[in-house]
Amino acid sequence: MKKLQGAHLRKPVTPDLLMTPSDQGDVDLDVDFAADRGNWTGKLDFLLSCIGYCVGLGNVWRFPYRAYTNGGGAFLVPYFLMLAICGIPLFFLELSLGQFSSLGPLAVWKISPLFKGAGAAMLLIVGLVAIYYNMIIAYVLFYLFASLTSNLPWEHCGNWWNTDLCLEHRGSKDGNGALPLNLTSTVSPSEEYWSRYVLHIQGSQGIGSPGHIRWNLCLCLLLAWVIVYLCILKGVKSSGKVVYFTATFPYLILLMLLVRGVTLPGAWKGIQFYLTPQFHHLLSSKVWIEAALQIFYSLGVGFGGLLTFASYNTFHQNIYRDTFIVTLGNAITSILAGFAIFSVLGYMSQELGVPVDQVAKAGPGLAFVVYPQAMTMLPLSPFWSFLFFFMLLTLGLDSQFAFLETIVTAVTDEFPYYLRPKKAVFSGLICVAMYLLGLVLTTDGGMYWLVLLDDYSASFGLMVVVITTCLAVTRVYGIQRFCRDIHMMLGFKPGFYFRACWLFLSPATLLALLVYSIVKYQPSEYGSYRFPAWAELLGILMGLLSCLMIPAGMLVAVLREEGSLWERLQQASRPAMDWGPSLEENRTGMYVATLAGSQSPKPLMVHMRKYGGITSFENTAIEVDREIAEEEESMM
């Protein structure tokens, strides 16, 4: 670090006075970071990582289904409205917290130690999600390898795993186009391949008796964790380069599938079914709730991934611009995925002679049953199947990178002296532990456990965490102070739109979602299987545990202070003494000389010494100092 500083002083750099720091390119990225923590090697690393994190499996198997069941094209109205009210503001808030402090989900609560339990809850949620999410990637790997044949194994009946109900539905309609009477009581080869061969679910009596470990799934899960570990081995320096492929290549495959889909006979039938506006659906509260839920989970707000990624940015990275690029790009990707999926489902509907709604499904059923069945109807079916599952693999890996990086960053920021020098070893231990915990998902009844984790690990608990974060930042820390922090970073304050959303609209919407999810609670199920009461209780406790982390953290914070209860609460809610930008030269106004070991009375002097003059950002720093001084005078 001393060598870098010395070299920098020998060769002064004078930025363009008319440029903001966020627009000055990638020059000298490393001087804006705590050197031992690591950083992105370029701005594009961060942007692509955020895109890869947000654009995931849900864009392919959840958005299209939710769109057509909630009014088709009319669903886009509440979808984009909820994106504006909830998605964009919360996305920007989380990025701002991470970039301003250069800290992970736990240490960032120096902003108000009373709410550090929200960071712990975030880690618990992301840990549970990472365990089962990598199992989905293992399923994708299984199908990817199975596609490397001349004939897809789920194309025909007659295999050892098939039953007497198996019927090759292709070409099953008679001469006048009428369906056989017994078609609805039959099962497609792709469905039996998924349930009886891949999952081998017939070997389990339920969630309480998972049966034996499926060694082929066990090995696929191991491979998935090895891939993830190798990609995050050097933190964001390695994962930031991997995303150049994993975040962009899915778009190429999606484009190929889209072109192939729309050229199939019957494709328009599926697209019409997907987007035909049914505006009467907008009168139903369910449609608005579905739109908000889709935005909430699709952008990954509250999982800590956005905060973690932003913490590796330069202090002046233009996250305002990046917010709109990622959020709008994610929405457009979801819509394009719908065209690619439903064009093929329309073709499948015409081939089978059944309505589109009888072949369209949401969730894993679409990825591992319906779409693979559609692939068998195309020429060169193994090729298209391989492309589809390779797309799912790259979509899933990006999100998994974020989950693991969030956990590793949060813990290493809490214990930097011990863990940062051994970050690679620590990351390996996390991966091994999660692999062992995920082995239950590779059993005959593993799908039951996966459904339970999916339904409860990031449900109402995640909403409570995000509501708490929003209220803590805007109400306890203060909206004016938070906007001033953003002013220090970007050179401007957030406008009325962001303030209104942070203070009222976003928390109110999330609270409505939380109430709705509780009122409309339905027990988990998988197909015809109903989960026993003890499993439901376990799931509810799983969600409650993350919520209980918040009051538990409050209790710990209060006990660490001195004085009466009210005095303890006041002290614990105030920012820590060293809260603020991680580097001395970025600290101004209220943050002057509050960094441990600070030698300079005015960080502005450091800027002038480094750059040889006052840049546009230094002018911003002077403005912030003046504002604070005026506020102090008015209070006296």
Image (cartoon, rainbow, N blue to C red):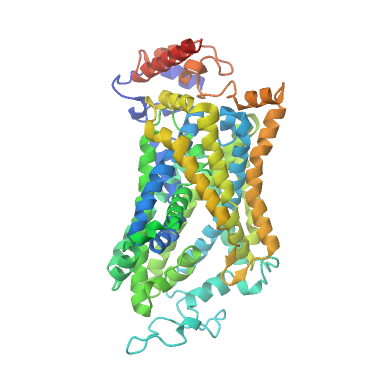
> What's the residue at 37%, 47% (across, down)?
81
The answer to whether residue 471 shows anywhere in this view is yes
Q: Residue 197's spot in the image, x, y percent? A: 56, 73
- State which quadrant residue 173 falls in: bottom left
Image position of 171 with respect to 523: above or below: below
Could you say where residue 291 lies in the image, as x and y percent from the top left?
A: 43, 53
Q: Please tell me which residue is depicted at 52% across the width and 24% down the height of the picture.
A: 580
Q: Residue at x 60, y 63 (%)?
A: 524
Is 538 rendered above or below residue 186?
A: above
Q: Is residue 347 above or below residue 518?
A: below
| Extreme residue in the front direction | 283
**Residue at the spot x=48%, y=46% of the render?**
300
Where does the image place residue 208, in percent across and percent down from the top left?
70, 66
Asked if 35 appears above or below 12 in the picture, the reply is: below
Q: How many marks?
A: 0
Residue 378 can be seen, yes or no: no
Picture quarter containing residue 277?
bottom left
The reply, left or right, for residue 308 in relation to residue 150 is right
**Residue 124 at x, y percent in the picture:** 62, 45
Relative placement, left or right, of 28 versus 146 is left
